[in-house]
Image: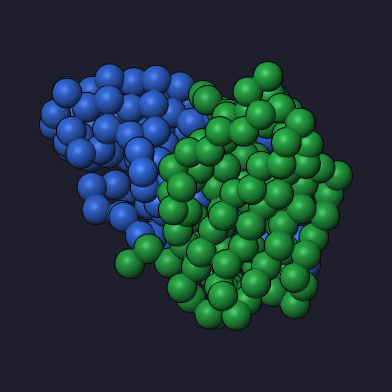
């Protein structure tokens, strides 16, 4: 039972354009959502998060949008840079529970 | 401040052999985790610990044991390795940022191959 799903295994965009990574979840009890970024041969690193009481959180080039009614969140990267090429994991949690991760999306930003 | 470190970085085992993966953190975090990452499956929780001397099972605990004798260390043991345990293993420690808000810091991973 995959409670957090990232349906696109890969995404390729041109440098300077917008990257949109999507994530769907099934558990309506999730109240906190995170995005992690992972480079090859390194561990995931925290990127940005959003509480379920908000619908948008922005940090520089990164914005996360949350649509609770659709149980969907997305990560927007604008403008995309070659250094953004990595695997992006969506994760969700409820208060006091452990993180549940999605499968990951490989983003490639072409110069 | 080294963060979260893992030893070893790579290992090849034969079926039936045993080994221990070491995770260390210097951030004084209470919570620590062991995950495995397999292609197309994201990160799956093996075991976790909410403090020194405590451990709990995660999503995929079979074939693994853990110990948390010291707060800064979390050990993952494979008693009798199987090819299905070929994976990349990540350790993480966790800090509570606020009410119900948790943030995990990951180690660089251990790539294990069981032949």
Q: Position of residue B41 (x, y in %)?
A: 37, 47
In which quarter of the view is residue B103 placed? Answer: bottom right
Q: Colour of chain B?
A: blue
- Whether residue B17 is situated above or below residue A30 in the rendered picture: above
Q: Is residue A14 visible?
A: yes
- Can residue B5 be seen here? no
Query: A75 or A38: which is nearer to us?
Result: A75
Q: Is B26 rendered above or below residue A25?
A: above
Q: Quarter holding the C terminus of chain B? A: top left
Q: How many marks?
A: 0
Name the residue at the right extreme.
A60
Left or right: residue B3 compared with residue A4: right
Q: Residue most toward the left?
A: B16
Q: Residue at x 36, y 43 (%)?
A: B40
Left or right side of B85 for A53? right
- Give me the residue at 33% from left, 27% from top: B112
Indicate the chain coloured green by its letter: A
Question: In terms of image quadrants, where is residue A22?
Answer: bottom right
Up/down of A58 relative to A97, above or below = above
On screen, residue A9 versus residue A53, left or right, reads left
Q: Which x, y percent locates residue A5?
A: 45, 59
């Amino acid at each position: 039972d995959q409670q957090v799903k990232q349906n696109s295994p890969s995404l390729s965009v041109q440098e300077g354009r917008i990257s949109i990574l999507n994530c769907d979840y099934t558990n309506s009890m999730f109240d906190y959502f995170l995005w992690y970024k992972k480079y090859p041969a390194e561990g995931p690193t925290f990127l940005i998060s959003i509480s379920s009481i908000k619908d948008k959180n922005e940090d520089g080039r990164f914005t996360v949008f949350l649509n609770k009614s659709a149980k969907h969140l997305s990560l927007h990267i604008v403008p995309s840079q070659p250094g953004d090429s990595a695997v992006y994991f969506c994760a969700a949690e409820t208060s006091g529970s452990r993180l549940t991760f999605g499968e990951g999306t490989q983003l490639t930003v072409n110069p | 401040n080294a963060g979260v470190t893992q030893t070893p970085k790579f290992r090849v085992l034969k079926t039936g052999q045993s080994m221990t993966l070491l995770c260390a953190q210097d951030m004084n975090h209470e919570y620590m985790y062991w995950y495995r990452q397999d292609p197309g499956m994201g990160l799956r929780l093996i075991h976790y610990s909410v403090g020194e001397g405590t451990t709990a099972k995660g999503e995929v605990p079979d074939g693994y044991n853990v110990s948390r004798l010291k707060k800064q260390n979390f050990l993952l043991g494979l008693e009798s390795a199987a090819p299905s345990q070929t994976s990349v293993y990540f350790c993480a420690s966790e800090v509570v940022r606020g009410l119900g808000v948790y943030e995990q810091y990951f180690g660089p991973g251990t790539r294990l191959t069981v032949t």
